[in-house]
């Protein structure tokens, strides 16, 4: 029998990426997703946000205002299915603002150099978009590839961080070229 987790949510909008919904639990940020806040999840007017949710909203707003390049938030990965996914997300957290890495680099960093596709699957299942920066992962040939939030949003996030992207198709080239980081 699963135990229900109390979650709270807030919604904000950025002109470059549209709506962003942040979900927190007592453990920390549990989910960040693009799109409108689901019906019935709006807090009543005058209701104070829990501290963790308020902090997450403030940090996200500062990020979109280009006043923050990293996040200091507790993260709740209790809903993540596998240890491998958690390892991948741990490596993603090391990719700095304005940098990109590849699925292969992440695979090598988690000790599974032949598992770039599995890394891609873990990245696509990332529940905490932006904070766990899966938008900073590109193909080994320097091309965009996919993004669960859509390529236009991936390009907007990368450009906001100062990464040059030639277009918004999966074959668009990303500059600067991938610089292997010590992950």
Image (cartoon, rainbow, N blue to C red):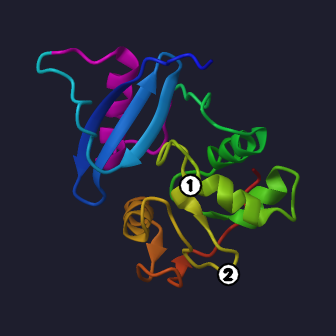
Name the N-terminal-most of marks 1 and 2.
1
The residue located at (45%, 45%) in the rendering is 69
User: Is residue 103 visible in this depiction of the protein?
Assistant: yes
Task: Indicate left or right for 65 with 28 as reference.
Answer: left
Tag 1: Cα neighbours inside 10 Å, few (<14), some, or many (≥20)? many
Q: How many marks?
A: 2
Region in magenta: 47-73
Disc assigned to residue 134: 1
Quadrant of the rendered image containing residue 23: top left
Q: For the N terminus, give its image quadrant.
A: top right
Q: From the top left corner, tell me how far across and down residue 135 is, in percent.
A: 52, 59
User: Is residue 66 visible in this depiction of the protein?
Assistant: no
Disc assigned to residue 141: 2
Residue 175 lies in the magenta stretch:
no
Disc assigned to residue 183: none
Q: From the top left corner, tell me how far across and down residue 110 is, in percent.
A: 82, 49
Tag 2: Cα neighbours inside 10 Å, few (<14), some, or many (≥20)? few
Q: Secondary structure at mark 2?
A: loop
């Amino acid at each position: 029998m699963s135990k229900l987790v109390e979650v709270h949510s807030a919604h904000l909008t950025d002109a470059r990426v549209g709506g962003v919904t942040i979900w927190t639990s007592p453990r920390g940020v549990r989910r960040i997703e693009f799109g409108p806040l689901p019906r019935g999840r709006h807090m009543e007017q005058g209701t104070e946000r829990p501290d963790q949710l308020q902090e997450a909203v403030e940090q996200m707003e500062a990020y979109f205002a280009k006043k923050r390049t990293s996040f200091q938030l507790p993260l709740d990965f209790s809903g993540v299915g596998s240890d491998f996914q958690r390892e991948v997300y741990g490596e993603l957290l090391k990719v700095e603002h304005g940098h990109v890495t590849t699925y292969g680099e992440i695979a090598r960093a988690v000790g599974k150099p032949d598992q770039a596709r599995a890394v891609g699957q873990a990245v696509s299942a990332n529940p905490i978009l932006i904070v766990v920066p899966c938008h900073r992962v590109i193909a080994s040939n320097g091309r965009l590839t996919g993004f669960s939030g859509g390529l236009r949003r991936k390009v907007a996030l990368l450009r906001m961080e100062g990464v040059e992207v030639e277009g918004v198709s999966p074959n668009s080239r990303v500059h600067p070229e991938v610089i292997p980081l010590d992950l």
